[in-house]
Image (spheres, coloured by chain):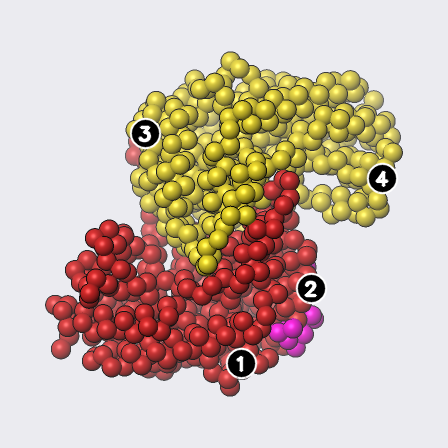
Chain colours: A yellow, B red
Amino acid sequence: MTFVPSQRGTSAPASPIRRLTPYADRAKQRGLEVLHLNIGQPDVATPRTVIAAYHSFEDKVLAYGASEGSLAYRQALAGYYNDLGAARGGPAISPADIVVTTGGSEALLFAIAATCDPGDELLVAEPYYPNYQGFAYLLSVQIKPVTTYGAEGFALSAEQVEAALGPRTKAIVLSSPGNPTGAVLSSAQLRAIGDVCLRRGVYFICDEVYRDFVYDEAIREGGSTSPSVLTQPGLAECAIMVDSVSKRYSACGARVGCLVTRNAAIRAAIVKFAQARLSPPVVDMLAAQAALATPASELAAVTAEYKRRRDALVAGLSTIAGVSARTPQGAFYLVVQLPVDDAERFCIFLLEQFDLDGATVMLAPADGFYATPGLGKQEVRAAYVLEVAKLQRSCEILRAALQAYPGTLK
Amino acid sequence: MTFVPSQRGTSAPASPIRRLTPYADRAKQRGLEVLHLNIGQPDVATPRTVIAAYHSFEDKVLAYGASEGSLAYRQALAGYYNDLGAARGGPAISPADIVVTTGGSEALLFAIAATCDPGDELLVAEPYYPNYQGFAYLLSVQIKPVTTYGAEGFALSAEQVEAALGPRTKAIVLSSPGNPTGAVLSSAQLRAIGDVCLRRGVYFICDEVYRDFVYDEAIREGGSTSPSVLTQPGLAECAIMVDSVSKRYSACGARVGCLVTRNAAIRAAIVKFAQARLSPPVVDMLAAQAALATPASELAAVTAEYKRRRDALVAGLSTIAGVSARTPQGAFYLVVQLPVDDAERFCIFLLEQFDLDGATVMLAPADGFYATPGLGKQEVRAAYVLEVAKLQRSCEILRAALQAYPGTLK
């Protein structure tokens, strides 16, 4: 007998963010410095309160936590969402509306599973966060893309969404601020898309893990964050908000996120999934709770630093012939158009055959951020998670690499 | 439009281990002490080395870990499995054979997803660990049960397995030592079942999280643990071993487990699933690595303590009229037959309407441990994770409750 994996295991794509990692490992083995613009791993220090929470764990038994997350943490989270203005969008958020998850990743997995059955469609706006596709494969759900374009600031209209809905479309998942686009949905756009969802019986899963990283004063809500689906009136039945401590508190390794919805039936389904995996990591949940006490000034300083980085990267790229990237409004990613035959080949060239004074750059080929075959072949995603000087060096490396690369279009 | 969850979200069962929790919470609110025999949450102290690992985490940035787990931890785990005798079953285990997961739970989820598509069958031996069903629902996989019986020590033969295989059966998942049965598969049984799997092209997912908890010298392998599927020759293609630090090191809240297989295609599929969720919890992974240094004498003392508990609980139950339970060989559970009309009703009675000197007992109704409707209605699962005196008190409470309960069969 032959032993082959399941269809979903065979056909699932490798992560475009991580699939070139073996090339990077080999470059490092050759002694090169690799500047990682491929992954949204901030270099910003994790708040001391978070690290201190690990240090102060003194339980005799490291026991299971509650499947839906500890009541204390859910109470604290409810306060945080209500401070964001959730009461504008319906009843104030209560701890019962919240399920704590193992990272935003698990919140996405549970949200898709609770809304879509095998063969159902999940709408995305491409370029999109490719792990949505990873979860869709795991759950045998089909990704249906709506294409957005860099030249239009990756804008997404409610009309585009509505036109793409089919009889098997059960949910739409959008990140705002957007990964990889940096686009931020305004309150009006969230409401317009939400109204389509309500009218058509489609769930609106809104991935808000970059909420704090928004650089345009005009679209900030409550003074500091991007608009949330939770604060839009009338969407209680269809809205499922996904969140994470990873980016906000530079605590990616904690693997703590959550999911908030006022739809009790969806919550009940998700709690059953949560019970099957017993509990989120317990000490990390305490650390996540401690993170909520991070002073707003500390978070604001981080956002200001990312704004400097964004501006430095956009400025640096703008001086390279043939390269173009629009200034994004939020998150910490940039979709960059490159004058090359094939962006993946160029990314591998950077890691395998190129260095500038002993350093090279790792980028994420953008084709994996599109569900439509053929798109993104001349684009990469760059994360501006390194300090300004390193981003400037990265631009110099890119400039030189494009001169050296045989597939650069003249 | 109405907003209802997906089929898998609606039809998934609530965990029989946790579904009575609201009753227990109310009992505690009334001031009662609740003795938790419902859940496998050990009261044994977590090794100090594990707690110390949390205390010594000093990275500036709590960054993502590797999706498949850190190389250092996988190297340490490979050493552990090779010390168990994995080389008897094929090539020595290498770090590349191992994927670190968020608890054994995620290892099970990934193993089922990598082997079964929607509508495929996953064979279990009932009574079984009910979260297998939770993961099966999440993945739209069908559970197919083979029934085993307390009067036969919950024995499972290769013939029973083979007779139950159908054209859509892609995998079998067994826990050994068994939850909830306490039954331990001998090397000969593992090989016999594995041979059927090989012959019929079915994956053998072996859940060995209770490996250390085996009380019968005769079936211990390597002096201290239950036989592992990894050490049986010839099963490299079909065997997928699931493990966890939760029980072995009394670190359930760490949520670190792993999956080991020599089947490269299965591993490749699972690494893609692992990449989608980015990484296991990072500080917990360090704690899990530290746990491997726990002295064998400390683990042996814990096993000896569980043996005392097992014996105390079995002895205590044997003095209650109408109650029967066979002495289990391993794990720390007991399937107990009760002289009642309906075990769930009795469990609720215990929490809602009964106490003995201010204390009561929480048990897990066993019907949720069977996939066949109607089975387990007069059985409960009891976990002997409390100290002997509390187990003895639990027996007194049970004796008195059976006298007071209106549905006790005379």
Mark 3 vs mark 2, foreground winner is 3
Q: Which mark is residue B94?
A: 2
Do the dots labelled 3 and 2 sit on one chain? no
- Residue B71 drawn in magenta: no
Question: How far, Cα to Cα, is label 1 from label 3?
Answer: 56 Å
Q: In percent of the image, x 60 and y 76: which residue is there?
A: B232
Q: Which mark is residue B220?
A: 1
Q: Residues within 10 Å of mark 1 (few under 14, many from 20)?
A: some
Mark 4 vs mark 2, foreground winner is 2
Q: Residue furthest bottom?
A: B218
Q: In percent of the image, x 47 and y 77: which residue is there?
A: B304
Q: In percent of the image, x 71 and y 23: which residue is there?
A: A313
Who is closer to the viewer here, B403 or B174? B403
- Residue hosting label 4: A353
- In the figure, residue A41 lies in which quadrant? top right
Amino acid found under the numbered disc labelled 1? Arg
Q: Is residue A271 visible?
A: yes
Residues rendered magenta in the picture: B83-97
Q: For this view, does B97 lie left or right of residue A407?
A: left
Circle 1 SS class: loop
Question: How far, Cα to Cα, is label 4 from label 3?
Answer: 56 Å
Amino acid found under the numbered disc labelled 3? Ala
- Residue hosting label 3: A92
Tell how many labels: 4
> Which quadrant of the figure contains the N terminus of chain A?
bottom right
Q: Residues within 10 Å of mark 2 (few under 14, many from 20)?
A: some
Residue B199 drawn above or below residue A358: below
Question: How far, Cα to Cα, is label 3 from label 2?
Answer: 52 Å
Residue B111 drawn above or below residue A165: below
